[in-house]
Image (cartoon, helix red, strand yellow):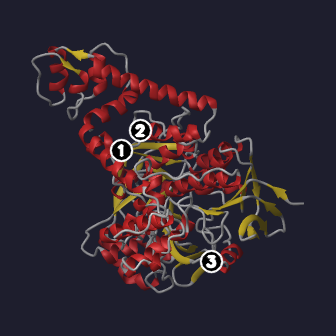
Amino acid sequence: MQERYDVIVIGGGHAGAEAAALASRAGARTLLLTQNLETIGQMSCNPAIGGIAKGTVVREVDALGGIMGRATDLARIQFRMLNRSKGPAVWSPRAQCDRGLYRRAVRALLERRPNLDLAQGTVAGLTIEGGEVRGVTTQDGRRHSARAVVLTAGTFLRGVIHLGLDTRVPAGRAGDAPTVELAQVIERYGVTVERFKTGTPPRIDGRSVDLDRLFRQDGDAKPYWFSFYERSIHPAQLPCYLTWTGDQLRDIIVAQLRQSALYGGAISSLGPRYCPSIEDKIVKFPDAVRHQVFLEPEGLDTCEMYVNGLSTSLPAGVQLEFLRTVPGLESVRMTRPGYAIEYDYFPPTQLTASLELRALPGLFLAGQVNGTTGYEEAAGQGLLAGINAAARALDRDPVTLPRDLAFIGVLVDDLVHRGVDEPYRLFTSRSEYRLLLRQDNALRRLLPLAERLSLLEDQELDAAQRRLGRENDIMAEAQSLSLDATSATAILTQHGSTAVGEPRRIAELGRRPGVPTAELLRAAGAEVGEEECEWADIELKYAGYLVRERTNAQRLAELNGFLLPESLTYRSILTLSYESREKLHQARPRSLGQASRIPGVSPSDLQNLVVEVLRSRRASSGEGCFT
């Protein structure tokens, strides 16, 4: 018997979890199929969520109804707001998590969805009808039909673990079998497949570490929640520890470099430039005196620690040898060796902006199969793929996120129109509008879309509207209330700002660097908290910059409003350079704005493209051509 669903999600990692959650929230009857139900939400590498740009993505996912932020709040065992010294507009939340608590939280949150089924099984094939994907078959012979399928296989597609030159283990991650048949099926339909590699560091027994010799790093005492909708009770916080590599570690790696899977020739695939192995660090930065090593707790119920900064593919014996050269780790016991893993990915220029594979309509891709790296990048793609898979199944319009609306929009636009030549990682520098895309205003930016798509439950929508309403009231108070000169001067001078000789509006005083708007409002008699004042404080202090970025965003919107016909034959437009013709033919941009972000398409090519499109429009309307 064949079970029928609207959407089937393959894979239960960070992309798969969000895809399943959002497809079900969008009204689609959804099935999540994964090789092992016990590993839904597994943190395969670093047990941490958030960070620079990534923390903002987590809040964007949450604003649209996703689960990553809620799971993090339930599992975090250390929280820090990064970039505090650089001003609140670029603050970045990051949480260390208990692996077990996080995994269980993800599954529990998924099981709350009323029209979402979870099932264990390995997908071996796709059902294709009329050139479109219409379901899946599993290795044990089960068949499930659907109008859309989301593939979020992570590193499992023909994954191979490397440990030194002699150890090659077919695996999606340590202990889990790879997916081979599905990769072969997709490749047979003419989809380009390439290989990337990533890696993970060793884990150690924290009881064997001399913690007194290390720099202790505690979490922030001030409470913070990634989720806008729920206020979970946080687990107790644990410290992290900082140490450094030295000359001995460098000498060991230089002497044993040919035993590395990467440098010994066992791996030829590219890895993430911004998360290099310790071998890469030693080779590419030979003059560096030392490299940071962070020891991060794996959970509340274990002494195991994650050795952040020492990813490696050297043999296990070499790993233990170099670990014991690190200050504080002289007697360390290694519980699990690090390893490198090679896997298939599909170059993302083969996707539409809705993350649907052009060669196989009905099949959506999200996560590392699109050439990205990182839990948060996977979650953002999974969210959008889930929404669009549901839209296809329910005959609705696809959804895209503009670059000025969300970091998720930046991520997807970069993937689809620029492609990748290494595992893609988000940074604030990838966005032209990073002052607009902040962690504090993610709900304000994305709530209208969540409401339009009916992604939120009534109580969630009420909570969001109350929060934004309170923020608006605070801004109105700041603009209407004044503070006398004496009270204002006391606060200003305390924060290193110059005194005033007459009453001033709080909005004017709040623009001064380092002067908290919340403190000014309380001095004027308003009852406000720090967190609820955050949005108004940033908007006041960065008002001039924000106006400039919103103006630039409007210009981008105008470019995006100039639509390019789907039938446009770019290779026949001889006024374009050969490189532009080929790049445009491959990417098939839907607007002039998308075309402008394709590498190799010059401003003069864009001007000629506009002329050709206008010429075509006039000809098709019967008005004749123009010169």
Residue linked to disc 2: 441
Residue linked to disc 1: 436
Q: Nearer the viewer, residue 189 or 104?
A: 189
Residue extending farthest to the right is: 1
Residue extending farthest to the front is: 623
Give percent across and percent down for residue 309. Answer: 40, 63
* Closer to viewer: mark 3 or mark 2: 2
For residue 44, above or below residue 156: above
Disc 2 residue type? Answer: Asn
Give percent across and percent down for residue 332. Answer: 46, 62
Mark 2 element type: loop
Residue linked to disc 3: 169
Mark 3 burial class by Cα count in 10 Å: few <14, some 14-19, many 20+: some
Give percent across and percent down for residue 204. Answer: 50, 61
CA gap between label 2 and label 1 equals: 8 Å
* Closer to viewer: mark 1 or mark 3: 1
CA gap between label 3 and label 2 equals: 45 Å
Which quarter of the figure has residue 146?
Answer: bottom right
Report if the CB atoms under discs 2 and 1 are less than 8 Å apart.
yes
Which residue does the image show at 79% across and 60% down from the upper left?
145
